[in-house]
Image (cartoon, grey):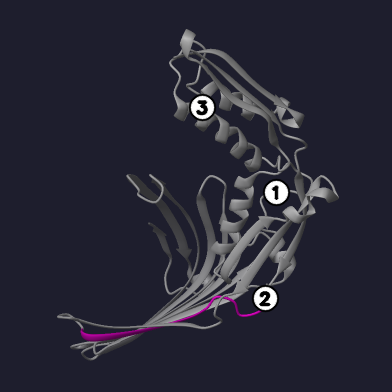
Amino acid sequence: VKVKVMDVVITGEAKDDEEFAKLIERSPLKVGKVLNQGEYDSLKSGIRNLALQRGYFNGDYKLSKLEVIPDFNEANVRLHYDSGIRYHFGPINITGSQIWENRVESMRPFEIGEPYLVSQVGEYNQNLSNTDWFSSVFVEPDLSKLDEGRELPIKVSLAPASKNQIETGLGYSTDTGVRGTLKWKKPWVSSRGHSFNTALSLSKPEQTITAGYKIPLDDVLREYYQLQFGLKHLDNRDTESLESNLAVERHWLTDGGWHKTIYVRHLYENFSQGLQDDGVQFVLPGATFSRTRVRGGNMPMWGDKQSVTIEYGDPALLSETRVLRLL
């Protein structure tokens, strides 16, 4: 049985939407081709799904029929879909957030009044999840408001993440012996969305502690300040040292995937070896540019990382000696 007639008609506002024409063009169901029931079902459900993805929530089939004429080994495909109007993004209704609502709303990838796209709803959901502020995130259109105008409200349902998260560990190696670790993270310190984390590592020859405080700016996911502090004590045979590192950083994440950082860090080290005892300090302004690329989604098949760091110290800037580092 071969297809004789392809009577596929889109009416409503979707008739001028190119994505529907592309979907129909990609379908293997064509005049003169052997009829495949699966291909018919796929085209029929594909049109309906595309309509929902693009905000035609009132769409429905006025006619959906597959006519098979056995005597002539022919089939007629008739799909008439009326999409109705296309809804646009309306006001954001946020519930359950412990973070300032303007911060939560700033992460939406769409403007109020733009045509609805389910992919942008998913992106908004992912943006909120990436902050680590919430234990659950659910973004959806409010379909109960379909009769109240073209602009459809978007519901954002949130639940706060645990304010304190603690992780412990214990290990052993031949170099350091027994090593214990403790990590403490506060995904949100206040309603502004600041966050704090610290880590402690203890072994007989080496003890380290690090801490960081992150201050997001208006573009929450892409721009932020960060304060970093680290302290390391090492006692290995006849060498003992104490090193501290304090940095103030400004971060930008660009559309091209580059992570740009400018910073100033203060480095101090006091060490003793045998009868020698000395201390040095550096104040080092610097910048880092890095990018990580991955192909293959959740199962990467390829990836690389590019990174360059430059920093400079000078006695006029309270450094022990003049130094230029390129990494």
Q: Residue at x 64, y 72 (%)?
A: 193
Q: Secondary structure at mark 3?
A: helix
Q: Main secondary structure of the magenta part?
A: strand
Q: Residue at x 24, y 90 (%)?
A: 204
Q: Residue at x 75, y 63 (%)?
A: 93
Crowding around mark 2 (Cα neighbors within 10 Å: few <14, some 14 to 19, many 20+) is some
| Quarter placement of the N terminus | top left
Crowding around mark 3 (Cα neighbors within 10 Å: few <14, some 14 to 19, many 20+) is some
Measure how far apart labels 2 and 1 are at the Cα level: 23 Å
Crowding around mark 1 (Cα neighbors within 10 Å: few <14, some 14 to 19, many 20+) is some
Q: Which mark is residue 98?
A: 2
Q: Residue furthest front?
A: 71
Q: Which residue type carries mark 2?
A: Gln
Q: Which residue type carries mark 1?
A: Phe
Residue 184 percent location from the top left of the image: 46, 82
Measure how far apart labels 1 and 3 are at the Cα level: 34 Å
Q: Foreground mark, 2 or 3?
A: 3
183 inside magenta stretch: yes
**According to the image, label 3 marks what residue?**
40
The reply to whether residue 63 is visible in this rendering is: yes
- The tag earlier along the polypeptide, 2 or 1, is 2
134 inside magenta stretch: no
**According to the image, label 1 marks what residue?**
110
Residue 41 percent location from the top left of the image: 51, 31
Residue 139: image quadrant is bottom right
